[in-house]
Image (cartoon, rainbow, N blue to C red):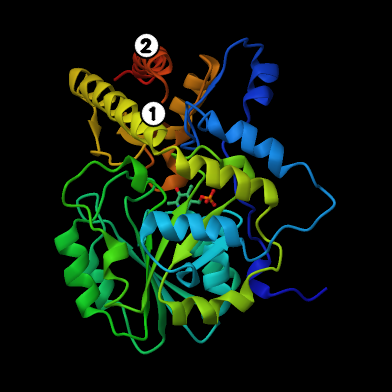
Amino acid sequence: MKVKKQLLGMEPYQPGKPIEEVKKELGLSEVHKLASNENPFGASPKVFEAVKQGASQPQIYPDGYAAEVRDAVADHLGVKGSQLLFGAGSDEVILMLCRAMLSPETNTVMATPSFSQYKHNAFIEGAEIREVPLKNGVHDLDSMAEQIDDNTRIVWVCNPNNPSGTYTTKADFETFLKKIPDDVLVVSDEAYVEYVTAEDYPDTISYLDEYPNLLVLRTFSKAYGLAAFRIGYGVGSEELISILDPVRPPFNTSTIAHSAAMAALEDQEYIERCRRENKKGLSKFAAFCEEQGLSYLPSQTNFMLIETGIPGNAMFQSLLKKGFIVRSGEALGFPQAIRVTVGTERQNELFLEALKESLQEQRQSIGK
Ligand SMILES: *Cc1c(COP(=O)(O)O)cnc(C)c1O
């Protein structure tokens, strides 16, 4: 068979290890998954009743246009419904953008390390990938802008950035937007926006009228706690969205996802509580790092990248044996770090104890 040549030798996405698998493999009774930045408190209690409703007619195709949740999200953001493009997670919106805009004659600009799916999808489309290293842990927007030429179609800004947890300020983002040619799409991926507390984080939705080449990505998978149901969206100009919409598979978001998303969106008090708890957890992590002399990147997300000074895979294995699934930094571009999701108060306490033990063990075994 003659598939696209770039597919040969490509690896599928490596997800965080599932809890049940780890329990079985290691004979552990309690395992905590702090690997995929899921909400440790789950979804709002209001979601569960709504999901039952959404599941009552499995034989009927979902509303592909997602009209009800579209109205709810439009209302929440203060935009028109026609400015939204829904996907099975924002991952699918990334896929649709690449499908619509990238080809072997084009290029796309992104930071590195950043979220893997920009590169993954651009690679499948055969586009040239221009990666610009983070500078002092944040997007180097000046260098990214310099990479743009006539063949550039999409520039990706992950804000806050996964896996570093750092963010681009309002001032820096505005300067950047002004510099970008108006036929180049700027994507602001805001998967963690609900966790942001920085005062100088940009309100990108307010730029959409002035910049029709801006697309904002949001998701229900992280703070809203709906990762299993697969729903996220892009917000852009009406014109851009109407051009992109034919790329969307006709029934890409499910009825259950629509019901869950509407109920979750309504419970903003819950989101606020999660944001507050998360911030407390981040402070605990930071205090631990300072006490242990570890460097870390200040995070505006629900995870933290911690430099342990030990190879990421070794720390991953060591923590796994103690019942904690984290992400090794080795596959994320930070070889001596781990990325860990902020958990519940109890999970955070247990995790920091385990991390302290693992650090001692690993340092002893390599004679540091
Ligand atoms: C988790 C994540 C997404 C995608 O999440 P979906 O579940 O596909 O909505 C997108 N961008 C970043 C930076 C993420 O961390």
Residue 220: % across, % down:
50, 47
Residue behind label 2 places its C-beta within 8 angstroms of ligand 1: no
Picture disc at residue 353: 2
Residue 87 lies in quadrant: bottom right
Looking at the image, which is closer to me, 54 or 201? 54
Q: Give the residue number, with chain letter if any, for mark 1.
A: 342
Quadrant of the rendering where the N terminus is positioned:
bottom right
Q: Above or below — where is 237 with respect to 187? A: below
**Secondary structure found at label 2:** helix
Asked whether residue 222 is in view, the answer is no
Looking at the image, which is closer to me, 82 or 174? 82
Residue behind label 1 places its C-beta within 8 angstroms of ligand 1: no
**Secondary structure found at label 1:** loop
**Left or right of 235 in this view: 32:** right
Asked whether residue 354 is in view, the answer is yes
Please state which of the two labelled residues, at mark 2 or mark 1, is closer to the viewer: 1
Which residue is depicted at the point 50% across and 32% down? 44
Q: CA distance from mark 2 to mark 1?
A: 14 Å
Looking at the image, which is closer to me, 153 or 203? 203
Amino acid of disc 2: Glu
Of the numbered discs 2 and 1, the one sitting upstream in the chain is 1
Residue 184: % across, % down:
37, 81
